[in-house]
Amino acid sequence: MRKTIIAGNWKMNHLGADAKATIQGLIEKMPKDVKAEVVIAPVFPYLSTAVEMTKGTAIHVAAQNMHWEENGAFTGEVSPAMLVDIGVTHVILGHSERRTYFNETDETVNKKTKAALAHNLTPIVCCGETLEQREEGIMQSWIEGQIENALKGISEADIKKVVIAYEPIWAIGTGKTASAAQAEEVCAIIRKKLAALYGAAAAEDVSVLYGGSVKGGNVAELTGSADIDGGLVGGASLKADDFLAIINNAVVK
Ligand code: PEP
């Protein structure tokens, strides 16, 4: 069965003291029997601190990006082996901000996804359409294309280890949430695409998250939908209490 995952993408936020305070708040207040898989993604300089602080808790630590190569002359990059070496377990790949500002492409997302799997890191692979694409009526083909390209060469055995995050670009950091019906429609499209690529049984095992202005007040309706298995949360993951409200209100099916 697939997992419910609540993942917090801190983006380029929090100096060390704020990062530690947020993690400490989560450790102190998160229910010990939390059912969802909880993930936080601080910036690279604080990943080790996050790993150390969360040892023995139910909190997992993700990077927000990585390179696909093992090591070498790639100034400014971080490799999968380095993330594993410090205890990171997940990595967010292909976030729309990386695609928009840092030339991330479907091809590099695919290389990174394969590298993550090869290192036993859980890739959280992001996809999503712009408002223009939605209005032009090409949302479905765009999303299906992103999924197909990101997963090229990934086996049926490995697909279960991949997490997909549907993040409509028009809903990220804008305060505009896709309605539960809109989010469910696209998450179901993603699962159908996964079924076409890997078979229905494998598609049932893949966690598909929704991201875009998720909050404590809307997470229950979103995660109550059949094909939405959690949330990728930006702004509301920065403060422990806001993130806890999401963790506590998420529906774990
Ligand atoms: C994100 O960037 O992944 C995101 C969903 O941001 P926000 O929750 O702030 O919309």
Image: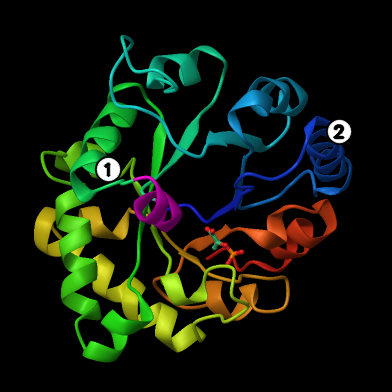
Q: Identify residue for label 2.
A: 17
Q: Quadrant of residue 51?
A: top right
Residue 96 in magenta stretch: yes
Query: Type of residue at label 2?
Result: Ala
Q: Quadrant of residue 93?
A: top left
Give the colour scheme of this rendering: rainbow
From the viewer's perspective, tell me whether residue 25 is left or right of residue 50.
Answer: right
Q: Which amino acid is tagged 1? A: Val
Can residue 192 be seen in this snapshot? no
Secondary structure at numbered mark 2: helix
In front of the other: 54 or 12: 12
Residue 92, percent from left and from top: 45, 43
193 left or right, relative to 245: left
Q: Residue at x 37, y 25 (%)?
A: 120
Q: Which residues are magenta?
A: 95-102
Distance CA(mark 1)–CA(mark 2):
32 Å
Relative to residue 157, is residue 248 drawn left or right? Answer: right
Q: What residue is disc 1 on?
A: 109
Picture quadrant where residue 78 is located? top left
Q: Can residue 29 be seen in this snapshot?
A: yes
Q: Position of residue 40 (x, y in %)?
A: 63, 42
Q: Residues within 10 Å of mark 1 (few under 14, many from 20)?
A: many
Can you say whether 160 is above or below 251 in the image? above
**Residue drawn 39% across the image and 20% down it:** 79
Mark 1 or mark 2, earlier in chain: 2
Ligand 1 found in image quarter: bottom right
Q: Is residue 243 inside the magenta stretch?
A: no
Q: Residue at x 74, y 52 (%)?
A: 238
Left or right for 112, reference 4: left
**Residue 31 coordinates in the image, percent (x, y):** 80, 49
